[in-house]
Every structure is written in C-alpha cells, then in structure tokens.
Image: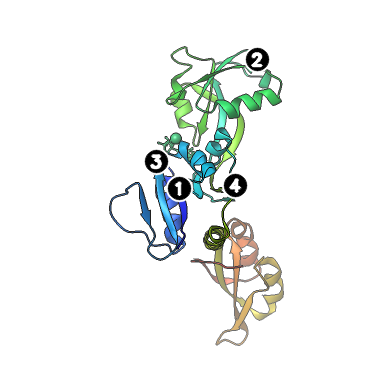
Amino acid sequence: MSKLKIAIQKSGRLSEKSLDLLKECGIKLPNGDRKLKTEAKNFPIEILYLRDDDIPQYVEQGVADVGILGENEVHEKGKNVLQIKKLGFANCKLALAIPKDEEYNGINWFENKKIATSYPKILEKFFKEKAIAVEVEEISGSVEIATGIGLANAIFDIVSTGSTLIMNGLKEVEVVMKSEAVLIANPNLNNLKKEILNQLIFRITAVRNASENKYILLNAPNSAIDQISKVLPGMKSPTILPLADKSWSSLHSVVKEDEFWDIIGQLKELGAQGILVVPIEKMII
Ligand code: ATP
Ligand code: MG
C-alpha cells in the first residue's frame, strides 16, 4: 500500500516539535535511533529525516510528498511547493539590524549599504520592491558577528528574543517577515496520497484547535445565566446544568485561551464562582 512520505528536520529547532505534533495526531513511531527514514506503525506515512534547507527541493521533486519546516526557508528556497497549513511553533521573525550607535531614520538608511545574511533571496526581494540598492553578502552562519568584524554594515537574520542582537551590539530596525513552522506539499500528489494528506490535515487541525482553546466550567446564580452566556464566546451557546442548590447552575463552554483573559473580570463581576479552565485534548469543529 502506498504511503505518504513526510520530511522533517533531522536535528535542530524543528525536530522535536515536528515529532511531537505527529505524536499528538495519534501517529506512533518506532522508538530508538533516528535513521534516515522510519515508518509509522498505525498510519500510512513514512518519515524522512533531512536538513531543513533540503526539504523544499525534495518536496518539489517528489522525493518527499510533504514536509515540515520554517516559512522562512520555504520563501528563501522559492521552490514549487504548496503551503498547506501553519503549525503554530518555531515562531520567529526575520529582521534587519544595525550597530546600536547608528542613527536610524528610516529604510533609506540601507541605500548602498552591505548587509550580511543567510537569506539572500528574501532580502533582495524586499529591497527590490522598495527600489533601494543594497549589497547582499551571503554567509551561512554566525551572521550576528558580521558588523563587528567589519564584513558588513548591517545584518538580516532570524530574531526571536533579541538577546543575540544585544550581545553583539546591534539593534533591530525593520521586520521583513514573520515565520512559523508550516506543512508544505508537492502539488502533484496522486489521489491516494491526497487522501492520506487530508486525514493528516484533519488530525493536525484538531490538535491545533485544541491547543488554542480551553474548556471552561463555572458556577453562576440562575439570575446571571443570560448575561454570562453573552460574555462566553463558546462554539455554540454554553451547556447549562443544574446544581443541587436550585438557585445555581453550572455553565460549560469552550473559549479561546487569549479571549479568556479578556473576559475573566467580567465573569467574576457577573457573579461567576468556582471558575475552572481545563485543557482540551482534541477538538473537532
Ligand atoms: P539544519 O541543520 O537542518 O539546516 P538550521 O541550523 O538551518 O538546521 P535551526 O537553527 O534548527 O536550523 O532552525 C530551524 C528553523 O527554526 C529556522 O529556519 C526557523 O524557521 C526556526 N527558528 C530558528 N531560530 C529560531 C528561534 N530563535 N526561535 C524560533 N524559531 C527559530
Ligand atoms: Mg538549515
């Protein structure tokens, strides 16, 4: 039987989270050493462990059918692959940074400057669209030291917390793109593989929805149920169950984690008590 070949990063920032995602999707992989490839025990997929730089090319060529990698790498490589779904991890941004003592008064600062980066294509496209001439110096690693050693006037690199920039006497001045891990696919999959991919997407969606949402339970006096129901966003209207004390009820609903923090104050003001917020394992909408 045909299997869907999925490429993930062999070792690096994406590896563990990619495997965790497959695990949360109920896909069981054999324990032990990570070889070049492994087969799932209970789902028709085969995992290929590769360098993330190579994944777009392999997916384009059909060596792998789908792959998990950072959007930044997908854009940089510019291969003919479909971007199927954002996966919500490995969030970072690609930013321009300059020595901290430089005065910066806008993007024209970069005119005729030399910029060191591992992402030359994304950078060239950015400045071409702005019609600003720059010199791009491609280097493969340790981009952040390029200004300190006199290789370039500025750098263009991945920034997450910004501490690496500070350590190297740099300041971020422009964000060029935001990135997170994505699922990409070869555009010409056969029907059987498309079917497996759809099942995988269905599971990933359920896992992603679950991680963004929480199940909320609270007790409320019956007189407050209408108002509290309006505040609770929920998938539908909340479930209402009677409590032993007849003048009180228990309300259950699903809320987005970030929305929850916005409404907690209102819920308490309306008389809600014993508020519980619990994680959801899977969520099918
Ligand atoms: P490989 O050896 O496979 O080529 P790599 O050194 O290119 O690995 P990693 O450093 O493991 O890559 O990063 C992989 C991806 O993780 C990056 O392309 C980016 O999308 C994301 N990433 C990188 N740095 C960070 C960070 N500091 N915070 C969050 N995500 C990041
Ligand atoms: Mg790489």
Quadrant where the N terminus sits is: bottom left
Q: Name the residue under label 3.
A: 12
Nearer the observer, 12 or 155: 12
Question: Element type at marker 4?
Answer: strand
Precedes in sequence: disc 2 or disc 3 = 3
C-beta proximity under 8 Å, tags 4 and 2: no
Label 3 Cα crowd, 10 Å radius (few <14 / some 14-19 / many 20+): few
Quarter the C terminus occupies: bottom right
Depth check, mark 4 against mark 3: the one in front is 4
Residue type at mark 2 is Glu
Residue 74 position by quadrant? top right
Q: Which of 173 and 114 is in front in this view?
A: 114
- State the residue at coordinates (61%, 31%): 176
Q: From this view, report whether residue 228 is shown above or below residue 117.
A: below
Amino acid type shown at disc 1: Ala
Q: Which of 263 and 102 is in front in this view?
A: 102
For the residue marked with disc 4, what is the amino acid? Answer: Gln
Residue type at numbered disc 3: Gly
Badge 4 is on which residue? 83
- Nearer the camera: disc 1 or disc 2: 1
Q: Where 84 falls versus 272 (above or below)? A: above
Residue 111, numbered circle: 2
Disc nearest the viewer among 3 and 1:
1
Q: Which of marks 1 and 2 is nearer the N terminus?
A: 1
Q: Name the residue under label 1.
A: 7
Residue 244 position (above or below residue 191) = below
Q: Where is residue 53 in the image (x, y as percent from the top left)?
A: 47, 36
Q: Which of marks 4 and 2 is in front?
A: 4
Q: Earlier in the sequence, mark 3 or mark 1?
A: 1
Give the left or right position of residue 43, taking residue 269 as reference. left
How crowded is the residue under tag 4: few (<14 C-alpha within 10 Å), some, or many (20+)? some
